[in-house]
Amino acid sequence: MIDDLLTLSRVGRHGKPFNAVPLDSLFDAIAANFRRAGLGPAGNIVRDGFLPTVTGDASQLLLLFQNLVSNGLKYSDPDKGEVRIYATETDESWKVFVADNGIGIEPQYHATIFEIFKRLHGYGEYAGTGIGLAICKKIVDRHGGTISVESEPGKGSTFCVELPKELPIVIPPESM
């Protein structure tokens, strides 16, 4: 838990400069990491189509999407669990979806699951600290984007990470 709290606190303060990050390569690395760790059967992480290149901190984007894929696998049947990654484009942004066929999330929790320590299950049911999705939200916020979930209990969850194509220039208030 201490490691997760440190990670959460470092997202804004110790981030690396933004560069072009090809999400195809990023998801290949994530799938390889899970295969090496022996998490689930081969082919349980599926990339549907082209994934864009976005602007961001590659290490934080890796952590973001690795957390979402990990949750998708954790809350799915170990033998039949599947996580699908795909993207769509709008005029101003890229929407990257991480969808699983897991246990799903009740609608009343869709907004609160991104808050720190918001666990929906007891500590004995599923491993975790209740910090992972708060880290994801903080990373997405740092990248000027949004994160949301659509889910139905028993049918899985789809997380949507929307990242702007062009990042706004932010002038710190103290420099004005």
Image (cartoon, rainbow, N blue to C red):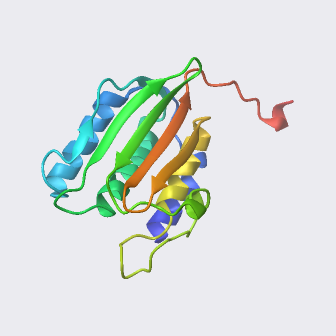
Most distant residue in the right direction: 176
How many numbered marks are there?
Answer: 0
Most distant residue in the top direction: 91
In this rendered view, identify the residue nearer to me: 42 or 14: 42
Q: In this view, does 129 lie above or below 155?
A: below
- Residue 15 appears left or right of 64: right
In percent of width and height, residue 106 lies at 51, 63
- Residue 95 appears left or right of 28: right
Quarter-of-image position of residue 27: top left
Quarter of the image with the C terminus in it:
top right
Q: In this view, does 12 lie above or below 105?
A: above
> Which residue is rendered at x = 56% and y = 57% of the image?
110
> Which residue is rendered at x = 22% and y = 48% of the image?
33
- Residue 17: in sight, yes or no? yes
In this rendered view, identify the residue nearer to me: 48 or 146: 48
In percent of width and height, residue 42 lies at 12, 48
- Residue 62: in sight, yes or no? no
In this rendered view, identify the residue nearer to me: 36 or 126: 126
Quarter-of-image position of residue 109: bottom right
In percent of width and height, residue 125 lies at 36, 78
In percent of width and height, residue 8 lies at 54, 57
